[in-house]
């Protein structure tokens, strides 16, 4: 369990760092080219690591559902939405919303047993955790009364 927790914490930190790096790339390139660069480099690095660590067994995907092959396309949306949200909201608030969305989505998928997951019952304790998370986001973004508000972001979302 500790190894799983360590990996999850590392993944969260890496996602935050990657989001900041991607945002810097996006300052010099379009969202589409940022996505192509990030995902292309990830593909090449993953391919090299897989072949080095597992040999050709790495290329054996067995009985994977055909539609799972398209999950890489979701990465395009992930990269574009990440870099745009950081630009429009700032890093702290954007990453907070991203993490909240991940947690709420995972809770939804667990509760419904989507994508072949074992169904995990939705409980009052989980509902309270979700409400607490949303409340935490509201506190994170809260301002002192009378404090100046941020300038509205540019209308160009993409």
Image (cartoon, rainbow, N blue to C red):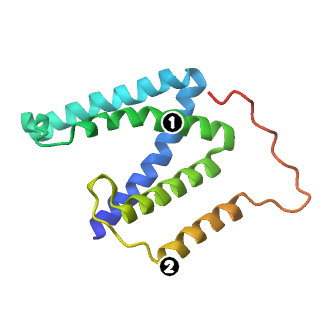
For residue 52, above or below residue 5: above
> Horizontal and vertical percent for residue 15?
45, 47
Please state if 99 lies on the left or on the right of 9 as rendered: right
What residue is disc 2 on? 124
**Secondary structure type for disc 2:** helix
* Residue projecting furthest to the right: 146
Q: Where on the picture, by quarter, is residue 116?
A: bottom left
Q: Residue at x 34, y 69 (%)?
A: 120
Q: 150 or 128: nearer the eye? A: 128
- Circle number at residue 21: 1
Q: Label 1: how many residues lie within 10 Å, few (<14), some (14-19) or many (20+)? A: few
User: Residue 84: percent from the left, percent from the top?
Assistant: 60, 35
Residue at the front extreme of this rendering = 112
Point out the image quarter for the C terminus. top right
**Residue under the image location 56 percent in, 35 percent down:** 83
Q: Is residue 129 above or below residue 134?
A: below
Question: Taking 22 as reference, is 156 left or right?
Answer: right
The answer to which of 157 and 150 lies nearer the viewer is 157
In the image as oriented, which residue stretches furthest toward the bottom?
Answer: 124
Compared with residue 121, is residue 112 higher up or lower down, i.e. above or below? above
Coordinates of residue 102 in the picture (x, y in percent):
47, 54
> How far apart, in angstroms, are the residues tagged by discs 1 and 2?
38 Å
Q: Position of residue 131 (x, y in %)?
A: 59, 70
């Amino acid at each position: 369990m500790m190894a799983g927790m360590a990996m999850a914490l590392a993944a969260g930190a890496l996602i935050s760092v990657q989001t900041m790096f991607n945002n810097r790339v996006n300052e010099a390139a379009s969202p589409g080219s940022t996505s192509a660069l990030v995902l292309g480099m990830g593909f090449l690095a993953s391919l090299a690591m897989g072949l080095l660590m597992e040999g050709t067994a790495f290329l054996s995907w067995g009985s994977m559902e055909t539609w799972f092959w398209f999950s890489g396309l979701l990465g395009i949306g992930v990269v574009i939405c990440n870099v745009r949200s950081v630009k429009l909201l700032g890093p702290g608030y954007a990453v907070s919303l991203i993490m909240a969305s991940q947690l709420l989505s995972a809770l939804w998928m667990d509760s419904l047993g989507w994508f072949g997951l074992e169904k995990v019952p939705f409980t009052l304790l989980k509902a309270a955790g979700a409400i607490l998370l949303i409340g935490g986001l509201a506190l994170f973004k809260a301002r002192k009364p009378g404090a100046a508000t941020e300038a509205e972001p540019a209308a160009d979302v993409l």
